[in-house]
Image: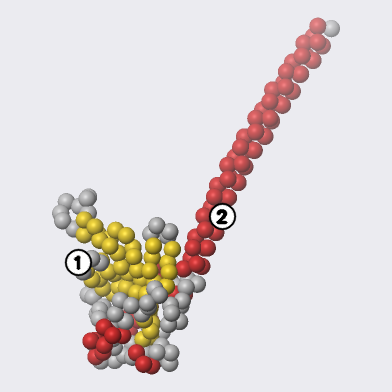
Amino acid sequence: MSEIVTQSVSLEQREQKNGTRKGRKRVGSFTIGAIGAVVLAVLVVSAVYAQVQEQGKYSLKSPSGIAFSDFKGYEDWSVVSSARTDEVLKVIVANPTMIKAYKVGLPGNGQPFPDGSRIVKLQWKPKKSTEAQFAVDVPDVFTQAFVMEKDSTRFPKSGGWGFAVFNYDAATDKFTADPKSPSDCGIACHTAVKAKDYIFHPYQKR
């Protein structure tokens, strides 16, 4: 009789242990699932925010009708050259159509850039590096994207080029179309390099 009781107690204890282990597995699975759901939610929110920001930027148009969306992807375009004034650090980038034209000798060979060419001058306020072991200026606050696009049909009066400026406000992380665009020169300044199809910067050797 005592053996039967002992076996019964032992069986009950094993069942309790199994139940505890199963419970722990369920809690562990729930915890992992909850963490996964939170991580997924954060990623989704971040992606949606980035998409909204991008859509907002690329919905802009200058007073002259130039759409910022015409330059979509400029963040990854190839560098043409750079420039520096006392107040502004500039990096000039161009789309694949224009880079291809540069590489076959334009505008130095006297030929005009083809329609569809697009170039962007990205501008930052500079600052002195506090990390370099020598005196050097580095980009600080991004301020502006000055854009040009070649379309002989749309812009026949300005050498086939359209000009626009999109300003960036770091405090709000937003772009706005410059109300005075085309400012920052435009065709008035670029006429000085008419012989180079109105483009100041050659494709720099690298």
On screen, residue 165 versus residue 16, left or right, reads: left
In this view, the residue in front, 21 or 164, is 164
Residue 195 in the image: state x and y as whole percent.
Answer: 24, 90
Three-letter code, disc 2: Val
Q: Quadrant of the C terminus?
A: bottom left
Residue 192 has which mark? none
Residue 95 in the image: state x and y as whole percent.
Answer: 38, 77
* Residue 15 seen anywhere in this rendered image of the structure: yes
Three-letter code, disc 1: Asp
* Residue on which the image places disc 2: 44
* Residue 94 seen anywhere in this rendered image of the structure: no
Residue 174 in the image: state x and y as whole percent.
Answer: 43, 63
In this view, the residue in front, 1 or 150, is 150
* Residue on which the image places disc 1: 86
**Residue shown at 29% from the left, 91% from the top:** 111
Q: CA distance from mark 2 to mark 1?
A: 42 Å
**Residue shown at 52% from the left, 58% from the top:** 49
Check the image and name the residue furthest to the left. Answer: 134
Residue count near mark 1 (Cα–Cα under 10 Å), binned few <14, some 14–19, many ≥20: few
Q: Secondary structure at mark 2?
A: helix
